[in-house]
Amino acid sequence: MDHHSINYLEIPTTDIGLSKAFFNTVFGWRFEDYGPQYSCFIDAGITGGFYQAEVSFNLEKGCPLIVLYSKDLEQTQAAVKAAGGAISTDIFSFPGGRRFHFIEPAGNEYAVWS
């Protein structure tokens, strides 16, 4: 553990099952359930968990953006669509790379960059 580093993320989801299935299919994350309202994600670059909530998050609400990395942005964007995600911002360039934003099936907004 690095002192004062971000160590764990807890992410709200309106449907744990939908979120788990989506992130397993698209990104290969594994999960360990701790009851029906919490599931820890593993192999995601950082450990964290989904917890059952009645809200979703997006940039319009001023929420932080969780950004994932991909070696092949177009392939990842296609996988997001195939797994039921919606592209909210198509691929665009920014200083340092390119990225797109998507809404996963439970309604949360994420981004992927390359």
Image (cartoon, grey):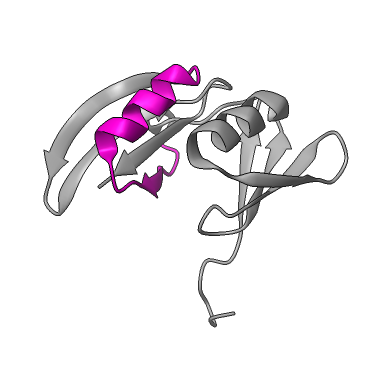
Image position of 60 (left or right of 46): left
Whether residue 60 is visible: no
Query: What number of labels is visible?
Result: 0
Image position of 60 (left or right of 20): left
Q: Residue at x 26, y 32 (%)?
A: 74
Residue 9's place in the image compared with 37, above or below, is below
Residue 77's place in the image compared with 69, above or below, is above
Where residue 78 appears, x then y in whole percent? 34, 24
Whether residue 59 is visible: yes
Q: Residue furthest right?
A: 35
Residue 52's place in the image compared with 31, above or below, is above
Q: Residue at x 11, y 51 (%)?
A: 95
Where residue 97 appears, x then y in whole percent? 16, 49
Specify the quadrant that holds the N terminus: bottom right
Residue 102's place in the image compared with 12, above or below, is above
**Residue 74 drawn in magenta:** yes
**Residue 52 drawn in magenta:** no
14, 78: nearer the viewer: 78
Q: Residue at x 58, y 55 (%)?
A: 43
Where residue 65 appears, x then y in whole percent? 40, 42
47, 63: nearer the viewer: 47
Q: Residue at x 50, y 21 (%)?
A: 83
Looking at the rendering, the stretch of residues picked out in magenta corresponds to: 62-84
